[in-house]
Image (cartoon, rainbow, N blue to C red):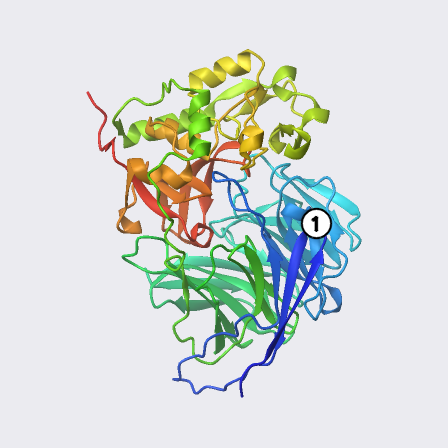
Amino acid sequence: MKSRNRLFAIGFGSAVFAFTAGCTDQTTLSENARAPEPTRETEAVGLAVPDVPPNVEPLGPTAIAPWQGGQTLVLDPPAAAIQVLGPDGMPRRPIKLTGVAQPTDMVVEAGFIYVLDAALRRVVKLDGSGRRVDVLAVPATIDLKQAKLSVPAADDVRLELADGTEAPLTVQRGPDGDLPGGAKLATPHGPVAWRFARVNERTGRLSLSNLPVAPKQRDMTVEGDDILSAAELVHVDSSQRLYILIEELLKDRPVYEIRMTVLRYAPDGSYLDAAPLPLANASRLPNRFLSFAADGTTSFIKIVNKKAVTVRLTYAVSRGVGETAGSAVPEPVLDDRETPFEAYVRSLAPVERGAAGPVSRDEMEQIARRLLDERFVLSRANYGRDDTSVCAPAQNRMWLRPARLNGQIGATVQSIPYKWGGHSDLFKIREDLRNGKLAGDICTCRAKIHNYCITPQSTGLDCSGFVAQVWRSPYHETSSLHKISNPVPRWEDLRKGDILNLAGSHVRVFLSLRTDGFYRVKTMESAVSCGGVCESSYRLGALIGYRPLRYRDVTEVAAQ
């Protein structure tokens, strides 16, 4: 029987939704049969992802979660709202977010919505109407890049970090059974603790504690067909079935090409079936891209062609060979001509003191760390006025203070602030701050009529400006960094000081690949999400589309 689909579209606030309804054949497979393609775009919702200027991290939804009455919540930072989608996929009235600067993750527990605000470093607890119930501070020592919320029990709020460990934000009030170095998952049967340990390149071990059925503690071996880069417990349904997400990394590829699969197990730990994630056309994944209903119904959200799409996953007995993400992202169209944006940025600082010829890998890291470790007292002049911190180019208002600096007058601040179009060296930025220039500017636009929203009265670095300083090179935006670099043939060949570049969007400086436990990439960058220069660790799913490049003037050792 052929699948018949109908497409519905509706405008709602600042977002556009589309819903595809149809029917798809379901097939029962024998143990050795190959799994069918997962259900594609059935019961799917498209949510528009706004365009961003050429040197800014991609925007769009960051999390998905189940909600009461069969509804789904989608955390939508560009709209400053939580979009509410009905059981039919159609939009309901959104929940507006007020006083949240940078929402990066969301979970639902006991009828409350918990939202992680990475810029203000806090977790906001909301009721179903969006009214604030409580606020928890996040310590400055916690890396919030790719951090995910976990609320395994009432008043037990935690952050799961990129390496699979947890950081508690409240006094622990849940039952005993935590696994040191692991994490905890909220389930209908109470919190379940889990911890991942690597056995070898393709195999890992998940230790589970507080399971709803005996034995309460269990070790499960998980294997991948390629490099097993991560495995985590993501759900326990109302029938006590276990859901484990595995991430696999393919070898000898020029990008981080990954495959993801949800494996489902019976309460006694025996394998049942699997759902490969449809990654082939994904250009990016949100921070939290899976949502589970109590009965195990699984929804997956991805970014496809500047639209966020949710897909209902189909489980089959055989794991099969799932789709991969990374290599399918189109190669950027490279142009050796100077872009108008680049020409304008360079015209603001025609003498580039940072361009000083060959640079060693150790020198690159030293420069990056000086920019990260720089401390300055945020004066009232550096802070600016609250009523002028507005990004509204059409009203000729084009300066927006980085959120991390809000309320920090007189405080000692660490790291060079993010400034759109900024590429001055450290000495010039210090001088600018002493002379009262505004610290940073995260107002970005492409409009030449507004001088690309670049404000001469502010100082700092954008992502390309940070790379220019680390490489001691002239300024190149992300779409032209290929002019001074060469592709790295395999991700295994990446070395300190190389970059991961998403042409037309964002760039990060590579430091190392950690392979103990979860595979994770350690980087440094200047980003809007950090409000300046920061050091972060990323799971591989966050690097879809980023291409490794190596500076042509790099040397392995410093000149004597």
x 31%, y 50%: residue: 491
Residue 302: x %, y % from top left? 53, 59
Q: Is residue 318 left or right of residue 65?
A: left
Residue 555: x %, y % from top left? 22, 31
Q: Is residue 211 visible?
A: no
Quadrant including the N terminus: bottom right
In front here: 412 or 475? 475
Residue furthest to the top: 435
Q: Is residue 223 left or right of residue 3?
A: left
Is 291 rendered above or below residue 166? Answer: below
Residue furthest to the front: 449
Is 133 rendered above or below residue 35? Answer: above
Q: Quadrant of residue 151?
A: bottom right
Q: Is residue 425 left or right of residue 67?
A: left
Q: Is residue 90 left or right of residue 473?
A: right
Is 57 rendered above or below residue 408? Answer: below
In front here: 356 or 144? 356
Residue furthest to the left: 560
From the image, tell me which residue sits under label 1. Answer: 81
Quadrant including the C terminus: top left
Q: Quadrant of residue 441?
A: top right
In front here: 330 or 449? 449
x 44%, y 22%: residue: 347
Query: What crowding class fits label 1: few (fewer than 14 Cα within 10 Å), some (14-19), or many (20 or more)?
Result: many
User: The residue under label 1 is which amino acid type?
Assistant: Ala
Residue 49: x %, y % from top left? 58, 52
Q: Is residue 389 visible?
A: yes
Residue 318: x %, y % from top left? 43, 79
